[in-house]
Amino acid sequence: MMAPVSGSAADRLPRLREAAAAQLSANWREGATPDGVEYGYTRPDTRKFPDQFFWDSCLHAVAWRHLDPARARRELRTLLAAQRPDGLIGHTIFWHAPVRLARRHTYNLLHHRDRATATIQPPLLAWAWAEVAERSPDDPGAGLIRYHDWLDRERAEPDGLLRIIQPDESGMDATPAYDGPLGRSAHPSPGFVLMMRANRGRGFDYRRTRAAGGFHAVDVLVNMAWALSWAGLA
């Protein structure tokens, strides 16, 4: 976490930029998987959250564009490298190693050896790419379109709005905003774990969840990100 920066606004800006650069650099991780996929991303926290998180990376890339545009592009391309054949890019990607045993029951994995979760986060990727591309023109290829096609096919209704099936898909994790609708399935009750287990059994599929009477919602933040990314994609 960055230390507070004091002084006048004119004095603070250069020091704030320097502190942000130091923090981003300290949290940067790069390498390659055993099968040769190269990655580079910014960890939200080097110990507690050492993996790549979808919307965190989108925001990190927008920050990186002011400091190192090439690293900003690499952050977003690393997300695209985790894309499944059907187009989904998961909430969390485990590049360094499979998810730790102590956290397997809290991550939305279809199988404990999966390298990424099967759930979403606010879909800011195309918006972030448009922000980064203002300074570093580059073409991300068809990956962004395939990701939008997956969301439109798997999570949108005829009204064009996306649905989430767990509070953590909102990007706010166990937000109290959904405690009322979830009732006995609200975090951190045992019902929350049972809900996740039921969703895993349904493959984290929205329409199967809705048909079974499971929790689903139109989240404002997720759909704001959806709209921003459609504009970025255009």
Image (tube, rainbow, N blue to C red):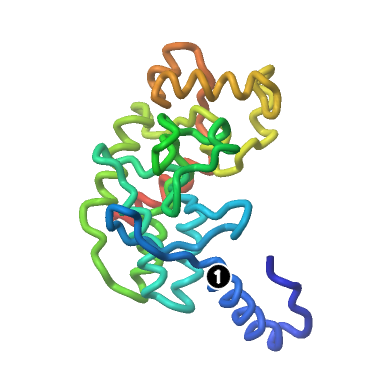
Q: Residue furthest right?
A: 7
Q: Residue furthest top?
A: 212
110 or 202: nearer the eye? Answer: 110
Q: How many badges with numbers are in the image?
A: 1
Q: What is the crowding at mark 1: few (fewer than 14 residues within 10 Å), some, or many (at least 20)?
A: some
The percent coordinates of residue 92 (x first, y second) are 47, 45
The percent coordinates of residue 79 (x first, y second) are 37, 54
Q: Quadrant of the C terminus?
A: bottom left
Identify the element where label 1 is drawn. helix
Direction from residue 216 to residue 8 in the image, left or right: right
218 or 65: nearer the eye? Answer: 65
The percent coordinates of residue 33 (x first, y second) are 35, 55
Residue shown at the point (62%, 24%) measured from the top left:
192
Q: Residue furthest left?
A: 142
Direction from residue 41 to residue 5 in the image, left or right: right
Relative to 15, residue 163 above or below: above
The percent coordinates of residue 233 (x first, y second) are 30, 54
Where, by quadrant of the figure, is residue 182 drawn? top right
Direction from residue 17 to residue 142 in the image, left or right: left
For the residue marked with disc 1, what is the amino acid?
A: Leu
Relative to 38, residue 84 above or below: above
Residue shown at the point (41%, 69%) measured from the top left:
72
Residue shown at the point (68%, 65%) measured from the top left:
1
Residue annotated with mark 1: 24
Residue shown at the point (65%, 82%) measured from the top left:
13
